Image (tube, rainbow, N blue to C red):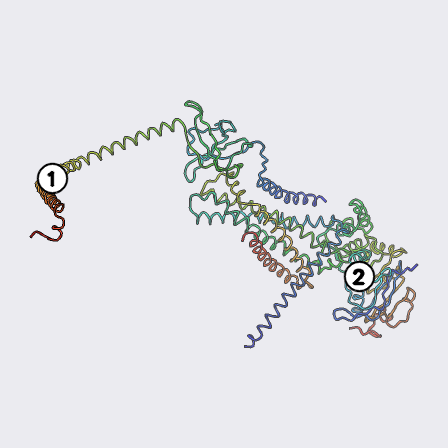
Amino acid sequence: MKQISKNELRVGLFILIPAGLLFLFIMFKLGYSIAGSTKDIYLKIDSITSVKEGTQIMVKGYPIGRVVDIEPVYKPALHFLATLRINNEIELYENCSAVIQNQNIIGDPIIELRNPDKKGALLREHDVIEGFEYVNLEAILQDVHMLLTNLTGTVDVVKQIALESRHNVRTLLADLSASVATVNRVLEDSQKDILAILGSFRVTAKTMSEIADELKKHPIKFLTQGKKD
Amino acid sequence: MDDTLLSIEHLSCDIGSHDPLVDINISLARGENAVFFGPENSGIETLMLFLLDIDDRYEGVIRYKNTDIREFDYIGKHNYRREIGYVHGMYGLISNMSVEDNISLPLEYHSTMSQKEIKRLVDRLIYELNLDYCKKLRPVDLSNSEALRTSYARAIVMDPELLIVKHAFEGQSPLNIRSFMDNLKERASRKDKSLIIVTYEPEKFIDFSDRFIMIFNGRVVFDGNRESYLDSENRYLVQYKEGSPAGPMAIL
Amino acid sequence: MQMLLSLPFTVGKKALKIWAGIGDFGRYCLSIALSFKSLRYLRFRSLYVIVINQTRFTGIDALNFVVLIALIIGATVIIQATTNLPKFGTEGFIGNLLVIIVARELGPLITALIVISRSGSAIAAEISTQKQNQEILSMEIMGIDTRLYIVFPRILASILSIFSLIMIFDLTAFIGGYVIARSTVYIAPEAFLQTLVDAFSLKDLLATLIKSIIYGTLVPLICCYYGFKASSKFEVPIFVSRAVIRTLFTIIVVNVVISILFYF
């Protein structure tokens, strides 16, 4: 009897544990949670300069949780996984973005979660948020510094281009002067011809005027006689 | 009131796989005890197969409480078998069960008794048959007599109307089966229970059997009471008792 | 030439034999179905011990072996995946890969194979030995429906055992796969778990449950059938071997059919 009892216990555990796991899995798949009012999600970040344990998490300025843990991940390249414990009642979607930003110029950074315009599946326990912006004072200064460096570089490049193109500009101007002189010469050369043409036009006009007068005076004679010669 | 428990009418069988039977007519009243005996291949084995409803390829009728056993439906067959206890020479104990589990098996399967009641009844039988010291053992660990007593306890635990004991005593030490024989004798004396003993040694049961039936070559060659058995000049019976090769039976 | 001429006869004879075998197995299944009629006359307590003992033997006693095989299988799948897939960006695939290969196919199939080789052969051997010792006959004469008393609790125990073993196999293979995967890429345990949960759909779960029930029914059913078949001690090993081989074949065919129905 004792043997049976021991067997019964072992068999009971053998059946109940997998059945329990199965039940939990089904509940999980159906969207139920046994974790209570909060859920943990992960945020992938490159640097932990501004995020630390306790960093507040907000949605539209309303606090919904805090960072509870940060773990380094070594592979394939060093990055970090921050565990965000957030209020379960806030509806967030799995393609939401996390923006790390300063509340003001000297304030602590916060993580602002933003729902996407196009809502996908609901964000669930242990989901990982991949895409995020990284905005803080240090980063801004870094960015400005980078911008100035880039600007200096650009000016240098422009300067170099200008130096290299000076000779070309000069040649261009000389060519331009030569072209103008050529045009002037052409104009000068053609002046006489233009006068001759204009004179010829004038003679032609005079002849035409005589023909017109003759026609007015003796139209029949003009028509029947034909040419004078 | 008709007191016939079992009646076999014009039972014949002639199929190759079994020993043949030719027009057997036997009836057994309630409370009557009968010893079936005969040489090997006489047909008793075949008769028992039909009686226990293991095979039904026979002509004639076997009636139990005036109902043809071939007419029983599934449940009727189930109930018929419940009312028969059977002990045989191979004992048929369930090898992965202990002695007490083997004995309580029919009760656990059929009866509405509580576990406590079953245990009380089984313990009583174990005590009566002197099996207390080995009740936790499995059949493989039992001696012949212990296996026989366990098998007998299992057969009678449901208190059947008819008990069939077939070649169960051969190769047993009389001293070791004393408790069993006492219990069997007591059961044989009951007026409401019947007993069929199939044996090669009918004289061992002379004290508690009132009917002796000898079968040879598929026929009943002797059917009589204790006195007839002792005094009859039946040639078959005489040859059998004397164990002589001379006589009407050709023994190979 | 004579061999060639006798070929159609041999094939025909074999086909008829297979057909007769299927018919016989069908009648056997029908007799089990009909034996359920006596369920109302039966006290379940007599089956309870058999169910417990069979579950212990089929399930708990096989646990060590199943866990070991599952760890190896899970690890092997991931070793193959990480050596043949790109080095980066495989984090999300590890869970999917384990679910597709292990949970959907290998888990149920290997579990069934282990159960067949351990318990199926034991069931066939036990029943045929019981038959030779006239234990089955004794039970029948006691009014015990041996189909119900022997086959039914074993089916029940096998379903429970195979279901639990598949669950444990899958879980262990996931752990084995994860341990190996961590040597090449870092995946947070929670994220890995999440991937698994996402990849393992309710359809996969349903397929696993159906497989547990079908395998759990078929393994003892076929093994008991061959156990009952042996008519002499000489035939015991023949029928035990036949039980194992035919159950294996049936289970593999059924696995393919279920996979086609669910995933094709």
Which residue is outermost to the left? A229
The amino acid type of the residue labelled 2 equals Leu
Residue B225's label in the rendered image is none
Helix, strand or loop at mark 1: helix
Helix, strand or loop at mark 2: loop
Q: Which residue is mark 1?
A: A187
Residue C28, above or below A47: below
**Looking at the picture, how far across and down is residue C20, in whole percent?**
65, 66
Is residue C180 found left or right of A201 in the rendered image?
right
Residue occupying the point 64% across, 65% down = C19
**Which chain hosts label 2?**
B
Cα separation between marks 2 and 1: 143 Å
The amino acid type of the residue labelled 1 equals Leu
**Looking at the picture, how far across and down is residue B203, in whole percent?**
86, 64
Is residue A131 found left or right of B189 in the rendered image?
left
Q: Is the residue at mark 2 from the same chain as the one at mark 1?
A: no
**Which chain hosts label 1?**
A
Please state which of residues C28 and C120 is positioned toward the viewer in this rendering.
C28
Residue occupying the point 19% across, 36% down = A165
Disc 2: CA contacts within 10 A as few (<14), some (14-19) or many (>=20)? some
Residue B176 seen by the camera: no
Residue B52's label in the rendered image is 2
Circles 2 and 1, Cβ within 8 Å, touching? The answer is no
Residue B41, above or below C258: below
**Looking at the picture, how far across and down is residue A103, in whole percent?**
44, 25
Q: Nearer the viewer, mark 2 or mark 1?
A: 1
Residue B58, above or below A34: below
Which quadrant of the structure image shows residue A24?
top right
Residue C85 seen by the camera: yes
Quarter of the figure with the N terminus of chain A: top right
